[in-house]
Image (cartoon, rainbow, N blue to C red):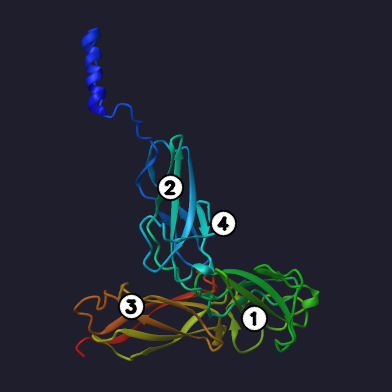
Amino acid sequence: MARRAKSLLGLAAAMTGVSLLWLAGAGTAASEAVPTNTTEPRILGDPNVGSTLTATRGLWTGSPTSYRFQWVRCPDSGGRPDGADCAAIGGATTQQYVVAEADAGRRLRVRVTASNADGPQTAASNATPKVGEVTMPVNTRPPTISGTVAVGSTLRADPGEWTNRPGFAYQWRRCNTNGGGCSDIRGADGQTYRLGQADRGTTIRVRVTARSGGSIATATSVPTAVVRATAPPAATNGCPAGTGPIRADRLSAPARMLIQGQQLVPAVVTGGTNSLTARFRVTACGGRPVQGAELYATAVPYFQFTPRRQPTGSDGWATLRMGRLGGFPANPGQQELLVMMVRATKGGTVLGGVSTRRLVSFPVNLAT
C-alpha cells in the first residue's frame, strides 16, 4: 500500500513538475507528548507508626499541569518497581501521609501521576524499609516537681525521661499528707501549677501522660512535702532552718555547697580499665547533705572518660558511671593520677552564688 502511494505521488510530481518530499510514516498520528519521569519520586521521613511521611513529585518532562498522589502498602519484598502490585491505601491521596498501625511490618511506596494536555503518566518511589512495630513509650526516669511548696508559690513539672520521643500532657493532683488519696485538680493541666489556699496542708503530685504514635503511657511523680501556709523568710546565711537534708532549691547566697566526699571503683585505674563508677557527696550549711543538686564530673584533660551529670539523693551522694574514651591515657607518662573536675550546681545555675567546683584525683597504674 505504501509502495503504491509512493508511485502515485511520483507520477503526480512528473505530471505537475512539482518536487514532493516523501515522509516516512506520513498519514499516521504523531506520538503524544505525555509527561516523562526523569527522576523518580522520593519519600521523606522515618517510617514509624505515627510519623508523617512526605512525597516529592520527582522530575518530569512535558510540563505537567497537575499531579496526583496515591500511597500504597507493599509486601516484604517491596513489590514491583512501579508499585502496581501494592495495595492502595484508602484516602491516602495527598503529598503527606501519617503512618498508621495497619502499616506496621509493611513497606510503603507513593505513586505519582503527572498529567498535561496530552495525557497522564505514573511513576513510583522506591519502597521504604519496613514500618517499625508500634512501640509504647517507656518511662526511664520518673517525673519530678521543683519549686517552693508554699501557698502562692509556683511548682514546675519535669516529665522525666522516656523512650520513643513522645509528646506530654500534665495533670496536677492533690493528695493527703502521706501522698495517697489523690484527686485531680480541676484545670491544672499545664507544666506549672500555682499553689492556692485549697492546697494548704496537702501534698501535690503530677501525673505525666506520654503519647508516641497511637500508644500512651503514664507516670506519676513522688509527692511534695506538705504545702505550708506561706514560704518561710529566707535565713540571713542562706540556709533553711532545721536539721537534716537540704533541698538544693532552698539554698540561697551566701550559702555554698561543698563537695566533701569522693569514691571510685576500681580504686586504682589501670591500663585495662574500661569504665569507672565515681561517687561524690555534696553538703552545705555545716555538713548537712544537699538533695537535688546537679553534680557534673569529667576527666581532665577531656576525652578520657565520658562526662556525666546526676542529681544528688537525700544523703547528698550522686553516683556517676563513666565509660572509657579514646583519649585515655592522656599521655604515655600518665602513671600516677587521674584528675577530674567536679561541679555541683543549684538546678544547673552555675552563677547562682551557691555552686561549687573542685578538682579531685584518683590513683593510676598503667603497668597493670
Tag of residue 140: none
Residue at position x 70%, y 75% from top? 172
Q: Is residue 2 above or below residue 8?
A: below
Of residues 197 and 281, the one drawn nearer to the viewer in this rendering: 197
Tag of residue 305: 3
Pinpoint residue 368: horizontal percent, then vertical percent: 21, 90
Of residues 134 and 291, the one drawn nearer to the viewer in this rendering: 134
**What amino acid type is highlighted by mark number 1?**
Pro
- What count of labels does the image hold? 4
Of residues 180 and 270, the one drawn nearer to the viewer in this rendering: 180
- Label 3 – label 4 distance at C-alpha: 53 Å
Indicate which disc, 2 or 3, sits on the residue closer to the N terminus: 2
Indicate which disc, 2 or 1, sits on the residue closer to the N terminus: 2
Indicate which disc, 4 or 1, sits on the residue closer to the N terminus: 4
Q: Which residue corresponds to mark 4? A: 91
- Label 1 – label 3 distance at C-alpha: 37 Å
Numbered disc 4: secondary structure: loop
Indicate which disc, 1 or 3, sits on the residue closer to the N terminus: 1
Indicate which disc, 3 or 4, sits on the residue closer to the N terminus: 4
Pinpoint residue 171: horizontal percent, then vertical percent: 68, 73
**What amino acid type is highlighted by mark number 2?**
Arg
- Which of pointers 2 and 4 indicates the residue nearer the eye? 4
Pinpoint residue 20: horizontal percent, then vertical percent: 24, 16
- Label 2 – label 1 distance at C-alpha: 65 Å
- Which of pointers 1 and 3 indicates the residue nearer the eye? 3
Q: Is residue 313 above or below residue 350?
A: below
- Label 2 – label 4 distance at C-alpha: 18 Å
**What amino acid type is highlighted by mark number 3?**
Phe
- Label 4 – label 1 distance at C-alpha: 63 Å
Q: Which residue corresponds to mark 1? A: 240
